[in-house]
Image (cartoon, helix red, strand yellow):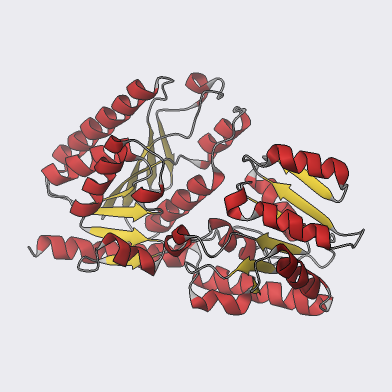
Amino acid sequence: MTVFYTATVCSKKTFDNIFANSVAKPGVQVQKFNYLIIKGIAMHSEKVIVFSKVPANMTTKLLGHSISETENEANVEFKNISWLKSKVVKTLNNFFIVLTETIKKLRRMKNTETVVSVFDTLSVSTSLALFLASKIFRVPTVIVLTDLPEFFKSSWLWKNSLKFIIKNADGYILLTEHMAGKLGVNDKPYIVIEGLVDTLRPTEVQMQRKRALFYAGGLYKEYGVLKLMKAFEYLKDNDLELWLAGNGDLVDYIQQASSRDKRIKYLGVIPNEKVLELEQMAALLVNPRPSDQEFTKYSFPSKLLEYMSSGTPVVTTRLPGIPEEYFKYLFVFEDETPEGMARTLDEILRKDQEFLISFGRSAQEFVLREKNYVVQGEKIVKFLETVIALKNSR
């Protein structure tokens, strides 16, 4: 089976290059999620052809001199789309390159290979192109849907293009079970894949840790970061630190708070390798996202799997998008007020160190066993085979 895939994703080499040469850093989680899906699919199929919408931006330097047009990793071929600064020209360029390249490849195959097209709809221009080319050749189409159109601040054209693709796709890879009902796709094949972890991450659990709480991700009030900071103010332990990494509209507030309270450390936007290192150094990893927001039914916090794979204990709010099987490996903020969160944090930090190490290791073993990209990739490929069989039977 050959899988066509498109998303805002690229090879690890290209992503590291863009990250190092951009002032505004590209999103790590979108790259990691799609990259691990591609790796997982590649483990169980003959070939994956990726039309890469590289995550460059206006601050990326030396791009034209440092990115190859085509890159290969094992049986994955990355076709990097030329990056242009004009938004309109870039969108049209992305669309026509993917459309023409897909049509050329499908013509050469002449129905001699089993093919399926998979796309992350966050990249609408390339997804629409791959979708239309696939429909021309009756190739099954499967959407990777990580968010719902209604929760995006985008143009009418963008949202309606996305709704058109969703309505007419043959199958769906969703983050949560709630998404199927909301989209009205219960009568079509779908699979829930909330995330994947990399088996290559060092699994040795750190015995000596810094007395620190660590949060890495978007620094926004709606993500619960302000509540976390207010909760931290209630904790009077002078040896305890709060590490915050990422970007968002709370950066100025955090920097001001850190000048008043030296225990608060703003680490900026740092490479994922450094984030992974800090996760294994901290005493506790925190996901403070409020559970009462409507969109949390239809999302799964991507950092949660990364946190759990570190072997460090994790505390989270009880988000409706998190499957129940996870909660036996997580501490939970049952009271999401700053005072309630502070009490929970204090209770956890008072627990016996050996218990905390064992608790973190259990979570690590769970995600590395059940949610690694090889296992999840096998589920996805079996699902793709089901979609192909249903399409061919009509």
Left or right, 41 with respect to 36, comes to left
Decide if residue 237 is in sight here: yes
Against 51, residue 206 (above or below) is below
Question: Residue 175: where, in percent of width, then height?
Answer: 41, 61
Against 81, residue 195 (above or below) is below
Left or right, 255 with respect to 89, comes to right
Q: Which one is nearer the viewer's eye here, 314 or 202?
A: 314
Question: Residue 366: where, in percent of width, then height?
Answer: 57, 74
Question: Residue 285: where, in percent of width, then height?
Answer: 70, 62
Image label count: 0
Left or right, 74 with respect to 280, comes to left
Residue displayed at 62% across by 31% down:
20
Decide if residue 114 is in sight here: no
Residue at the right extreme, as displayed: 238
Q: Dividing the image into 4 quarters, which one contains the C terminus?
A: bottom left
Q: Which one is nearer the viewer's eye here, 27 or 15?
A: 27
Left or right, 260 with respect to 374, comes to right
Occupied quadrant, residue 28:
top right
